[in-house]
Image: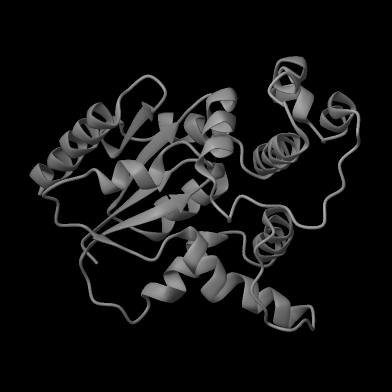
């Protein structure tokens, strides 16, 4: 393998959109985190638990299963990626995505020519994006919602630490919208519990400055994001 560029970022920071906007690069896009999770991680943990190997769509259930995989393999998704790449030809690759300081450290230690593009956005912006994108993957199954919307929001673990719940509560105009908002807040709050963006960035800040780029997608248009990424890739290519 020559080089691998890891996309770093949590749900709804703009990873897929940013990658799709790139032009004229010679990096092959590997199966993404969701695909590797379905292909390698969930089936292995289901087998360990004596469960049937079935597709899991519920985001919170997926978090639980992937947490067990991290307990088994501290390198987490990076370990799964190494397994996938074992018999693959050498080349320049993109991988979307890794999260949290532990995965970043594993990627740096496991792949010699590794680089990182950290895409980020404030919690409130990510919430708005998730609510609006209508992706079936952003779902929680068999959830019950209290008729008191603000009470239901307060019942979500750690939600009050990252959101102004009273402001969010004003977004719920009907029952269906309330359910979508509560499910989305649960996803972001739970994801933040497992993967902390602050400590991830602190780790990247300790590396060589030309090994990563940080972009807040809420402060840049998609065109600006793509140009910054393309400039970063040009810098990598010009190193060798």
Point 28% across, 31% down: residue: 225
Quadrant housing the N terminus: bottom left
Position of residue 43 in the picture relative to residue 28 (left or right): right
Seen in the picture, residue 158 relative to 194 is either above or below; the reply is above
Residue 146 appears in the picture as rendered: yes
Residue 198 appears in the picture as rendered: no
Position of residue 16 in the picture relative to residue 171 (left or right): left
Seen in the picture, residue 104 relative to 125 is either above or below; the reply is below
Seen in the picture, residue 73 relative to 164 is either above or below; the reply is below
Q: Report x, y in % for residue 213.
A: 32, 33
Q: Which residue appears farthest toward the front when viewing the image? A: 174
Q: How many marks?
A: 0
Point 39% across, 28% down: residue: 217
Q: Report x, y in % for residue 80.
A: 50, 69
Rendered image quadrant of residue 136:
bottom right
Q: Report x, y in % for residue 55.
A: 64, 74
Point 20% across, 66% down: residue: 91
User: In the depicted view, which residue is nearer to us: 105 or 166?
Assistant: 166
Rendered image quadrant of residue 141:
bottom right
Point 71% across, 82% down: residue: 47
Colour scheme of the rendered structure: one colour
User: In the depicted view, which residue is nearer to us: 10 or 1?
Assistant: 10
Position of residue 61 in the picture relative to residue 236 (left or right): right
Q: Report x, y in % for residue 161.
A: 75, 23
């Amino acid at each position: 393998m020559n080089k691998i560029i890891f996309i770093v970022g949590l749900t709804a920071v703009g990873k897929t959109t940013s990658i799709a906007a790139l032009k004229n690069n010679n990096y092959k896009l590997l199966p993404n985190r969701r695909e590797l999770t379905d292909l390698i991680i969930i089936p292995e943990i289901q087998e360990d638990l004596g469960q049937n190997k079935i597709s899991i769509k519920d985001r919170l259930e997926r978090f639980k299963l992937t947490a067990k995989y991290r307990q088994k393999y501290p390198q987490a998704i990076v370990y799964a990626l190494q397994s996938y790449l074992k018999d693959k030809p050498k080349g320049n690759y993109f991988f979307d995505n890794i999260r949290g300081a532990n995965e970043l450290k594993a990627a740096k230690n496991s792949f010699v020519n590794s680089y990182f593009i950290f895409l980020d956005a404030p919690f409130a912006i990510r919430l708005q994006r998730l609510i609006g994108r209508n992706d079936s993957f952003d779902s929680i199954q068999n959830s019950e919602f209290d008729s008191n919307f603000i009470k239901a929001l307060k019942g979500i673990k750690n939600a009050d630490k990252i959101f102004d719940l009273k402001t969010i509560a004003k977004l719920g105009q009907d029952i269906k919208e309330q359910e979508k908002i509560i499910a989305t807040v649960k996803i972001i709050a739970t994801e933040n519990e497992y993967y902390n963006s602050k400590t991830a960035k602190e780790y990247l800040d300790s590396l060589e400055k030309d090994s990563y780029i940080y972009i807040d997608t809420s402060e840049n248009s998609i065109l600006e994001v793509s140009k910054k990424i393309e400039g970063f890739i040009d810098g990598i290519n010009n190193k060798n």
